Image: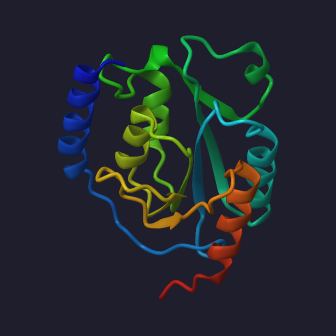
Amino acid sequence: MNQLSNYIGKSLLKRRSKKVDRDKSVQNFETAKQAVILFDTALPDCFPPIKEFTKFLKKQGIKTSVFGYVGEKETPQEMLLWADFEFITRKDISWYGGPKGEKAELYFSKEPDMLFVISFEQNLTVEYLSRLSTAKFKIGCYAKDDLCDLDLMINPSSKHFEVSYFIEQVKHYLTLLQPSK
């Protein structure tokens, strides 16, 4: 994406996100009924830990949907084998980085109690999906970005940040949270 489309995309996102009406509230594994996991498929070895995390959430009685962003026009064949995973590809995004189409509509139709954003690098499409979500409680990786609207941020240590470590940290901190009733 070139600088002009990136600039326009960020400007539009900033404007559109001001119109998002979301009911913010602290959630944990006991209070949440529905969750969405949003992740960047470019992360190394991301599928097994995300699959395990999905199973964990379902065992907690949380209805879970999983959406992956694929930086290609088509979903690679090996990803099609992952049942219950939806993939948003470059074909599903506009020239300025905003999501569009059937998969994006499916994503935005969800009204989760928790949104888990698993992306460690800046990605405008993932930011769009995260910022425009009406999730009550958004969890993700720490970012200095002014577009970030996460409610709980996990700050990576100086060592290489991995998906499995990030999910461990999310589980740890969410079990410590005691939402007010």
Q: Position of residue 97 (x, y in %)?
A: 35, 26
Which of the colour schemes (rainbow, by chain, secondary structure, one colour) is used? rainbow
Q: Reply above or below: 91 against 114.
A: above
Task: Name the image quarter holding residue 42.
Answer: top right
Considering the image in quadrants, where does the N terminus appear?
A: top left
- Who's the residue at 68% across and 34% down the image? 85
Identified at 63% across, 75% down, the residue is: 173
Name the residue nearer the viewer: 94 or 6.
6
Instruction: Please indicate whether residue 137 sits to the left or right of residue 55 in the image.
Output: left
Tell me the quarter of the picture where residue 178 sits.
bottom right
- Nearest the camera: 10 or 177? 10
Relative depth, front residue between 160 and 89: 160
| Residue 109 sits above or below residue 140 on the image | above
Q: Quadrant for residue 16, please give it.
A: top left
Q: Residue at x 63, y 41 (%)?
A: 66
Residue 55: x and y in percent read: 80, 53
Compared with 70, 118 (above or below) is: below
Residue at point 50%, 27% (across, down): 103
Image location (x, y in percent) of residue 45: 78, 38
